Amino acid sequence: MVTPGELLTAALRYAELGYRVFPCAPGNSTPLTDHGFLDATTEVEQIERWWGQHPTANVAIATAGLLVVDLDPAEGNAANPWLKDDPDKRLDLAAAPTAMTPRGGRHHVFRKPAGKGWRCTASRLAPKVDTRTDGGYIIVPPSWRPDGAYSWVPGLELDGPPDRLPEPPPWLVALLDSLAQETPTLAHVAAGGGQANPIPEGQRNATLARLGGNMRRVGMTLAEIAAALLQTNKDRCFPPLSPREVERIAASVARYEPDQIATAMAEGHWDQLMQVQAPQLAPVSLADLTARYPDLRRPVIHGLLRQGETMNVISAPKIGKSWLVTDLALAVATGRPWLDTFACEAGDVLIIDNELHGETSANRIPKVAAARQIGLGDVGGHVFVQNLRGHWQDIFSLGPYFRALEPGRFRVIILDAMYRFMPREMDENDNGTMANVYNAIDRYADLLGCCFVLIHHTSKGNQSGKAITDVGAGAGSQSRATDTHLVLRPHEEDDVVVLEAAVRSWPPVLPRCLRWAFPVWTPADDLDPTLLRSERPRRARRAEADADEAEQPEPSWDAERFAAAFVTGTPKTRDAILAEANAAGLSDWKAERLLRRAEGLGLVHRWASGRNRPSAYANVPQPASEDADQ
């Protein structure tokens, strides 16, 4: 029997490797989290909290970014006959980490190739052969069911990070691409009866559960879900399930709490929110406009920000922008210039932090204050912190919180980090979504008479050649919607960044260098801010390498050459062998295939390394005495 300690240890180990985990009910695959695999995480504290509450919970991995081929056994728990007559393709599947399920099935775990938009499938590759990728999850060892435990096939353990997994073989990629193209984009559901999309045997339970889950997520009741699923079962399931089974599915999904964001979107709560206190629209003549607003809004951070405005602060992850903005909060709280450059009007500051625990904030802010020679007595009653880690709130659900604050109470409100305030069902790459998010923030700023500072992250790739407003990740509206766009880009000198800003109501801001001296950034005006760190694009480096290879054609690889090149009499782990093969220009997929073939030909021998340790490979058999000692 698997012990609670083994389950928690396994969950933490997968998370350490980079796989997002979450708990499922003991003995089965029902998620124990509010939002199922959407709550999966690699955060140690959350994982320990989950298994502290459910010590015997099964361990599940969200399969976003992965491709898992799930072979269920045939009738009577016989081996699945798929690829029975094609041993080479079966060997290809065995190149990936492989788990055995309690009923004799197999999970082959690959890395999903970049650019593939595959979704989960059920029995589309072959009967009882499913795939799990974005939008799915799998149960992993040492999880258990009443009929046995999950286990990794010896030598095929999941013992490396996601980016070290092999990609699926080309023939499987071609099959999945073909299935993706065949997926109907318009379902003939509304017609009903025989004209609607049929739900065949083998897919009925899973399909009805997905439909019911979607209904529950948007707030539908058990009675509403049951009625809808019974009708779907009658019209589209061939043959229909029993009414009792359908009612069981409805009751199962109705146990979960509705998703507040999905419910609000389905019922139009956003429109209701945005219409609250909506101004009456009417044109104003220029004479009336200039008479009504003879001056610009009151400065808060001179040169950057005025009352009621918003500012994005953007840099790559872990570069130190949160420390920089903590310094900004203390500058406003004391009325001191920020970075010895930007004068600040004194006022109270509210930091709403979705990333740090309260203990971390309580440790970090005094460090910055001490570095700036600010006594805690000077700022203790002027800086306020709301830690939301573990109590997720998006920008819309915070509406009641903001409306409960006294207008004028805070000079600046900081949101750290912006991505964690995005509603779950919204996409930061969608212009409409981002416009709505920033419209809501503007409404809160007007209501409270304050500024908002939003800590954001950069888009992917090198940032040195981009315009200031193109550095932030997400839709273009996220840069146009703010009044100030402040970015930090790496300088060619280590521990130095270049601060640049695009402003709306101020004169242009000249770039300047900042040097990191824990825990603060200080101006480094002795450095040239035009010397941004630049990296040649990976594509250019690859093209150069390809050109070099073209000059000296490489002979083809086979199992004999592979074994001679990378396997010796001293045992080496699979990862070590693959790393050497990569350096020689072989892909993970090809190296895995050649290693398996060499083993099948007796050119390579697997050495056992003890429980919970990866197997090793050598070109000589493992001595019997060493094998017996394991």
Image (cartoon, rainbow, N blue to C red):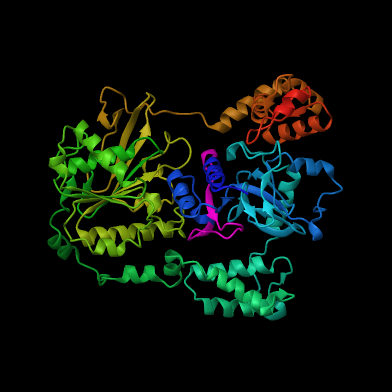
Position of residue 616 measured from the top left corner of the image (x, y, whole percent): 69, 28
Please give left or right for residue 3 compared with residue 444 in the image: right
The answer to whether residue 554 is seen in the rendering is no
In terms of secondary structure, what is the magenta stretch mainly?
loop
Q: Residue at x 15, y 65 (%)?
A: 288
**Magenta region:** 15-36
Image spot of residue 211 (x, y percent): 59, 69
Q: Is residue 180 magenta?
A: no
At 70% across and 36% down in the image, what residue appears?
155
Displayed quadrant of residue 263: bottom left
Residue 127 image position (x, y, % from top left): 77, 59
Q: Can residue 630 be seen in this snapshot? A: yes
Q: Give above or below for 551 relative to 74.
A: above
Give how far across and how far down residue 630 sits, in percent: 69, 30
Snapshot quadrant of residue 236:
bottom right
Q: Is residue 156 left or right of residue 484?
A: right
Q: Is residue 25 magenta?
A: yes
Residue shown at 63% from the left, 52% from the top: 144
Compare residues 475 and 411 and report the one nearer the observer: 411
Front residue of this view, candidates 621 and 396: 621
Task: Please give the count of numbered marks on the rendered protein.
Answer: 0
Q: Nearer the viewer, residue 55 or 361?
A: 55
Task: Give left or right: position of 338 versus 357.
Answer: left
* 489, above or below 86, in the image: above
Q: Is residue 196 left or right of residue 454?
A: right
